[in-house]
Image: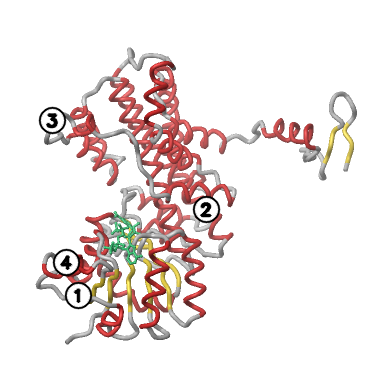
C-alpha cells in the first residue's frame, strides 16, 4: 500500500479537519487517536473514500509513513503533548519530524525543541488558526523551529493553508525554536483585544441606544463591507442576526455572559509584562474576561451598587458613527500593540521575526484576518525596522482623525455607566504614546522618597537622591 506522507495524531475537531484538508490536497494521511472508537468513526465516516488510513498503535502509525516521517500532533495543549511525544518516540528514527500544531505555550515548545533536537529528531512548533472551518478549508499556519523540517513540510502546508486574495498561501517559516507558537500566542492576544472592542461597541449600542440585535446586525454587515472588513466583524453580524431555535429570541439574549478563556490571551499579557511591552488592549481584554466570569458576584453587586441609567439622549446616528470610527482606530491600535510586542520578543529570544511575513500569513484563514493586513505589510515594506505601526504615516492618518470619535464614544459610554475598558485602554495607550512628558517624574520622586531608589534628571547625567521634607538634593 502507498505510504502516507504525513500522520495526524489526535482526532479532535482540528485533527480531523486538518487530516481531511491535507488528504483533499492529494497527500495520503495516516491518522491515530488515543480513543480507538474515534479513529474508527472517522475512517468510516468523514474520511471514507479519501486517502486516509486509520492506525491503532504508534508502531502501526510509524510503519504507515514514508521516511523521514512527518507527524502532526493535534492534541490538547499541555501535558498531553509531552505524553504523546514520549509514547511515540520509541517508534521513530533520527531525522523524523514531529510537528506540534496545538496551541502550546511557546516556552514549552522551546523546551521540547531542545530535548528533541538533542535526541536527533526535528521539531516544529506550528500555531494553527482558523478553528474548525479553517482547519478543513485552509487555516493560517505559523510554523517555527527546525528550518530543514519546514523545508520538508512546505509542500503539504502550502497546499493546506488558506490562500490570500493574491493567491499566496497563508503559511511561512516564522523563526527558530518557539517562534511559531510565539506568533500564534500574539495572534490570540490581538484576537482577544478585537473581540472585547467589538463587545463594548455592541454593549453601548444595544444597552445605551436600545438598539435591537437584528438592527445592530445590519449595521455590522454594513461596516464589514467597508473599512472594518474582517472575519470578526463578519461573524458578529451573523451572530446578532441569529435567533434562538427554542425561544425565537435573538440568540445573544439567551447566552450566559461569562466568557471562557484557554489562556493564550493571558500568556500574551504575562509575556508582555516580562518584556516590558505596553499591550493595554490585550491586558484590558483579559481583565474583562475575568470580570465576566464573576457572574454571581456581579449579580449581587448590581443590586446594591447603583450608577447612571444606560439611557442615551443625544444624536443616535452620531454615536453609531463614532462607534464605527472608534472601533476602526481601536483595532489598528490593537495590531500596533501586538506587533510592537513581537518586535521586543524578536530581540529578547532572537527569533528574527519578519513582520511583513507575519502580516502576510494573517491575511486569510485566521481569526484576526482583515483587509488592513495588506496595509500592515506595506508599512513594513516601507520600513522593516518600524517599531510601532503608529509611526507609519498611513496608520497615523487612520488613527489621528478618529481620536475624536474614540473620545466621544468613551465619554458617552462612561456617562451612561457602560464599561468600555478596552476602548479606554487603547485610547490611553495612544495618549500616553504621543505624550513626550508623562507624570512618571512624580512616580520616580515617590520611589526615591519612600525607598531611596534615586531618580534621573532631565538636565544632568547620573542618579540622584533627595533628602525629602526640606533638605537639599544630594548626588549619589
Ligand atoms: P482538543 O484540544 O479537545 O484535544 C483533543 C485531542 O487530544 C483528542 O484527540 C484527545 O484524544 C487528545 N488527547 C488528550 Br485531550 N490527552 C491525550 C493524551 N494524554 N494522549 C493522547 N491524546 C490525548 O482538540 P481540538 O479542539 O481539536 O484542538 C487540538 C489542538 O489545536 C489544541 O491544542 C487546541 O488548542 C488547538 N487549536 C484548536 C482550535 C479550535 O478551534 N478548536 C483552533 C486552533 C488551535 P481522545 O480522543 O483519546 O480524548
Sequence-wise, which precedes: disc 2 or disc 4?
A: 4
Q: Residues within 10 Å of mark 3 (few under 14, many from 20)?
A: few
As helix, strand or loop, the secondary structure at mark 1 comes to strand
Of circles 3 and 2, the one toward us is 3
Disc 1 and disc 4 in contact, CB within 8 angstroms: yes
**Identity of the residue furthest to the left in this view:** 49
Residue at numbered disc 4: 42
Sequence-wise, which precedes: disc 2 or disc 1?
A: 1
Mark 3–mark 2 Cα distance, whole angstroms, equals 52 Å
| Image vertical order of residue 30 relative to residue 247, above or below | below
Residue at numbered disc 3: 247
| Image vertical order of residue 86 relative to residue 59, above or below | above
Report the quarter where the C terminus lies.
top right
Residue at numbered disc 1: 54
As helix, strand or loop, the secondary structure at mark 2 comes to loop
Mark 2–mark 4 Cα distance, whole angstroms, equals 47 Å
Residue at numbered disc 2: 386
Of circles 2 and 4, the one toward us is 4
Amino acid at each position: 500500500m502507498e505510504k502516507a506522507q504525513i500522520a495526524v495524531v489526535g482526532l479532535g475537531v482540528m485533527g480531523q479537519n486538518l487530516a481531511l484538508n491535507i488528504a483533499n490536497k492529494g497527500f495520503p494521511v495516516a491518522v491515530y487517536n488515543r480513543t480507538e472508537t474515534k479513529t474508527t468513526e472517522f475512517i468510516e465516516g468523514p474520511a471514507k473514500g479519501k486517502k486516509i488510513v486509520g492506525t491503532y498503535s504508534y508502531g502501526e502509525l510509524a510503519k504507515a509513513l514514508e521516511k523521514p516521517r512527518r507527524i502532526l500532533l493535534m492534541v490538547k495543549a499541555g501535558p498531553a503533548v509531552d505524553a504523546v511525544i514520549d509514547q511515540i518516540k520509541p517508534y521513530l528514527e533520527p531525522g523524523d519530524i514531529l510537528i506540534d500544531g496545538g496551541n502550546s505555550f511557546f516556552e514549552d515548545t522551546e523546551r521540547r525543541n531542545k530535548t528533541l533536537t538533542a535526541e536527533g529528531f526535528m521539531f516544529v512548533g506550528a500555531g494553527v488558526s482558523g478553528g474548525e472551518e479553517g482547519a478543513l478549508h485552509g487555516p493560517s499556519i505559523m510554523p517555527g523551529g527546525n528550518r530543514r523540517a519546514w523545508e520538508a513540510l512546505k509542500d503539504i502546508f502550502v497546499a493546506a493553508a488558506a490562500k490570500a486574495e493574491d493567491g499566496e498561501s497563508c503559511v511561512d517559516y516564522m523563526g527558530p525554536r518557539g517562534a511559531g507558537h510565539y506568533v500564534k500566542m500574539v495572534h490570540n492576544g490581538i484576537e482577544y483585544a478585537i473581540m472585547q472592542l467589538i463587545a463594548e461597541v455592541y454593549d453601548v449600542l444595544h444597552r445605551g441606544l436600545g438598539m435591537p440585535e437584528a438592527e445592530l446586525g445590519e449595521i455590522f454587515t454594513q461596516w464589514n463591507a467597508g473599512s472594518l472588513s474582517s472575519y470578526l466583524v463578519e461573524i458578529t453580524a451573523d451572530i446578532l442576526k441569529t435567533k434562538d431555535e427554542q425561544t425565537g429570541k435573538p440568540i445573544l439574549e439567551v447566552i450566559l455572559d461569562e466568557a471562557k478563556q484557554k489562556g493564550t490571551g493571558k500568556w500574551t499579557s504575562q509575556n508582555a509584562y516580562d518584556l516590558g511591552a505596553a499591550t493595554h488592549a490585550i491586558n484590558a481584554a483579559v481583565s474583562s474576561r475575568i470580570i465576566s466570569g464573576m457572574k454571581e458576584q456581579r449579580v449581587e453587586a448590581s443590586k446594591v451598587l447603583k450608577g447612571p441609567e444606560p439611557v442615551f439622549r443625544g444624536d443616535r446616528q452620531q454615536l453609531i458613527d463614532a462607534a464605527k470610527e472608534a472601533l476602526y482606530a481601536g483595532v489598528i491600535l490593537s495590531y500596533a500593540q501586538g506587533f510592537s510586542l513581537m518586535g521586543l520578543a524578536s530581540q529578547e529570544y532572537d527569533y528574527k521575526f519578519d513582520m511583513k511575513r507575519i502580516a502576510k500569513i494573517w491575511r486569510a484563514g485566521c481569526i484576526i484576518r482583515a483587509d488592513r493586513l495588506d496595509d500592515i505589510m506595506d508599512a513594513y515594506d516601507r520600513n522593516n525596522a518600524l517599531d510601532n505601526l503608529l509611526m507609519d504615516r498611513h496608520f497615523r492618518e487612520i488613527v489621528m482623525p478618529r481620536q475624536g470619535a474614540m473620545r466621544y464614544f468613551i465619554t458617552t459610554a462612561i456617562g451612561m455607566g457602560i464599561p468600555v475598558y478596552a476602548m479606554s485602554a487603547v485610547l490611553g495607550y495612544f495618549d500616553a504614546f504621543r505624550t513626550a512628558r508623562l507624570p512618571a517624574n512624580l512616580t520616580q520622586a515617590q520611589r526615591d522618597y519612600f525607598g531611596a531608589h534615586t531618580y534621573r534628571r532631565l538636565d544632568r547625567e547620573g542618579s540622584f537622591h533627595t533628602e525629602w521634607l526640606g533638605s537639599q538634593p544630594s548626588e549619589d
